[in-house]
């Protein structure tokens, strides 16, 4: 089945460590997105990419980095500069402008 | 700034009743609205969408109503079932502040609990 796969489902980070969250889609979608979700909150946009080798900062990009070397992959790195990284991270993709985004099942990141 | 908000953070209904979840938006230039359902520990799942040139759209057991005059969106779920228990988000798609990219803005969500 086509969809978005996020891995791992749970991830733990030590102080001062960078961690990378994987997002892969086989929907042939051009646009991909990373969101952060905190308890009782809506989704906040971290980074997005409209095409391969191009990406833009969202509302809360500080402490995060991304790459888009392939259409199907959009990994997110949570760097040591992100002081409050504990959250649920969601990856999404979209086909065209006025179409809904499709989401993966998220990665829950915690600090050891 | 632009925002999408929900009137009620929680809603509790009896199985078989109809549910209505409300959402207010502030961006009068919004082109497109989406309702998502999110179950615990999972990503949001698309339920139904509506474009700004429509005021009603129906799906299977769900109806979305759009009132552009008062910038209000609602999701109606008919014959609510225990499996409908989840957090429901509305989202508003409109151009970002730069006017060059579409941006999806989410509300905080409404927790729907269906009592058997």
Image (tube, coloured by chain):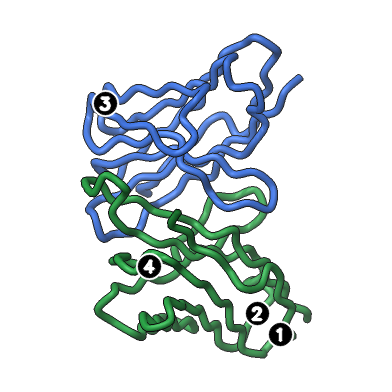
Q: Earlier in the sequence, mark 4 or mark 2?
A: 4
Residue A42 in percent (x, y) is at 57, 52
Labels 2 and 1 in the same subunit: yes
Q: Tell me if mark 3 has few (under 14), some (14-19) or many (20+) residues whose alpha carbon lies within 10 angstroms of its own.
A: few
Is the residue under label 1 in contact with that under label 4 (CB below 8 Å)?
no
Q: Colour of chain A?
A: blue
Residue at the disc numbered 1: B15
> Could you classify mark 1 by the number of other residues whose Cα lies within 10 Å: few (under 14), some (14-19), or many (20 or more)?
some
Label 1 sits on a secondary structure element that is loop
Q: Nearer the viewer, residue B26 or A75?
A: B26
Q: Position of residue A59 (x, y in %)?
A: 45, 39
Do the dots labelled 4 and 2 sit on one chain? yes
Q: What residue is shown at x 41% (from left), y 42% (from top)?
A: A4
Is disc 4 in the same subunit as disc 1? yes
Q: Residues under labels 4 and 1: Cα distance?
A: 27 Å
The image quadrant that residue B50 belongs to is bottom left
Mark 2 crowdedness (10 Å alpha carbons): few <14, some 14-19, many ≥20: some
* Dot 2 and dot 1 residues touching (CB under 8 Å): yes
Query: Which residue is label 4 attached to?
Result: B33
Residue B83, image quadrant: bottom right
- Residue B62, numbered circle: none
The CA span between labels 3 and 2 is: 41 Å
Q: CA distance from mark 4 to mark 2?
A: 24 Å
**Element at label 4:** strand
Q: Which mark is residue A70?
A: 3
Q: Horizontally, is B60 left or right of B51 in the view?
A: right
Depth check: B70 or A11 in front? B70
Q: CA distance from mark 1 to mark 3?
A: 46 Å
Quarter of the image where the N terminus of chain B is located: bottom left
């Amino acid at each position: 089945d086509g969809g978005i796969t996020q891995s791992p489902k749970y991830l733990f980070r030590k102080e001062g460590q960078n961690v990378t969250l994987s997002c892969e889609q086989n929907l042939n979608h051009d646009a991909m997105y990373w969101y952060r979700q905190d308890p009782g909150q809506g989704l906040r946009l971290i980074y997005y990419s409209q095409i391969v080798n191009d990406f833009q900062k969202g509302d809360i990009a500080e402490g995060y980095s991304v790459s888009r070397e392939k259409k199907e992959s959009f990994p997110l790195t949570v760097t040591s500069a992100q002081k409050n990284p504990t959250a649920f991270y969601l990856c999404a993709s979209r086909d065209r402008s006025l179409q809904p985004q499709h989401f993966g099942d998220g990665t829950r990141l915690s600090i050891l | 700034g632009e925002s999408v908000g929900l009137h009620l953070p929680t809603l509790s209904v009896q199985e078989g009743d109809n549910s209505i979840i409300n959402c207010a938006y502030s961006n009068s230039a919004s082109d497109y609205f989406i309702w998502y359902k999110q179950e615990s520990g999972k990503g949001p799942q698309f339920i139904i969408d509506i474009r700004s040139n429509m005021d009603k759209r129906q799906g299977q057991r769900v109806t979305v109503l759009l009132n552009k005059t008062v910038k209000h969106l609602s999701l109606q779920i008919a014959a609510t079932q225990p499996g409908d228990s989840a957090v429901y988000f509305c989202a508003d798609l409109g151009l970002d502040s730069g006017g060059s990219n579409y941006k999806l803005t989410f509300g905080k969500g409404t927790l729907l609990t269906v009592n058997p």
